[in-house]
Amino acid sequence: MPRLLSPLVLALIGLILFGDGVYIHAKAWLAQVLLERAFDRSLATGEMIKPWSWADTWPVARIEVKRIGASAIVLEGVSGQALAFGPGHIPQTADAGERGVAVYAAHRDTHFRFLRNVAIGDVIEITRRDGKQYRYRADHADVVRSDAPGIDPSTQSRELALATCWPFDAVTSGPERYVLHATLIETGE
């Protein structure tokens, strides 16, 4: 009996862990569908539209890297709850297109998984919820400590920084962050 029970227990544990992984990715996918709808309504109405009634955040922008087919809706703030559903706009940083650095952060295994495929020179398009569009060129990337991100908030240029945990294939969090820096090249205001 114990010989039969051990494989069954291990199979059950494996199934639970697999289901947990599928649940995380399914939640991220469904959240992006609901966020897309809320963002489209924000564009149409000019109002802040929450993606679901109990949400403590709202969509503020869409990030697109068309060369690799990547797109994500950005939420206001970077609380743990917000980052569970999408990239977040770090408070007290510039909005896309404004003077300073607009900083967006997300998890490396869901919403910013595509950063590993962004090449220097790629165009990153940002559409704000007010409909204004901005195009940035990826200039360089850094791997930095989380307590020293290498972002100059006092810059007078118009920049974008996309930040996520490093390394991309790690299973646990660590002290390092990958930061992709980009410079504004075109406005569609």
Image (tube, rainbow, N blue to C red):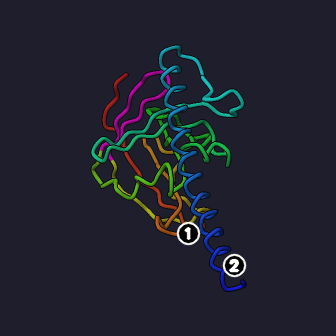
Q: Residues within 10 Å of mark 2 (few under 14, many from 20)?
A: few
Specify the quadrant of the image occupied by residue 17.
bottom right
- Quickly name the residue at label 2: 5
Give the structural element (helix, strand or loop) at label 1: loop
What range is drawn magenta here? Answer: 123-137
Q: Is residue 137 above or below residue 134?
A: below
Above-or-below relation of 155 to 20: above
Instruction: Give the SS element for disc 2.
Output: helix
The N terminus: image quadrant? bottom right
On the picture, is 120 further left or further right than 106? left
Q: Earlier in the sequence, mark 1 or mark 2?
A: 2
| Position of residue 125 in the picture relative to residue 82 (left or right) | left
Residue contact at pointers 1 and 2, CB within 8 angstroms: no
For image coordinates 27% across by 45% down, the residue present is 67
Task: Tell me how many marks there are.
Answer: 2
Q: Residue at x 31, y 32 (%)?
A: 186
Residue drawn at x 54%, y 44% as measured from the top left: 87
The answer to whether residue 55 is left or right of residue 46 is right
Q: CA distance from mark 1 to mark 2?
A: 29 Å
Q: Which mark is residue 58?
A: none
Residue 147 coordinates in the image, percent (x, y)? 62, 62
**Amino acid type, callout 2:** Leu
Please state the horizontal and vertical placement of residue 132, each as a whole percent of the image: 42, 24
Q: Is residue 122 above or below residue 73?
A: below
Residue 133 is inside the magenta segment: yes
Q: Position of residue 57 (x, y in %)?
A: 65, 33
Mark 1 highlights which residue? 171
Front residue (pair 6, 97): 6
Q: Quadrant of residue 4?
A: bottom right
Residue at far bottom of view: 3
Inspect the image, locate mark 1, and give the three-letter code of the amino acid beneath it.
Val
The reply to whether the magenta stretch includes residue 15 is no
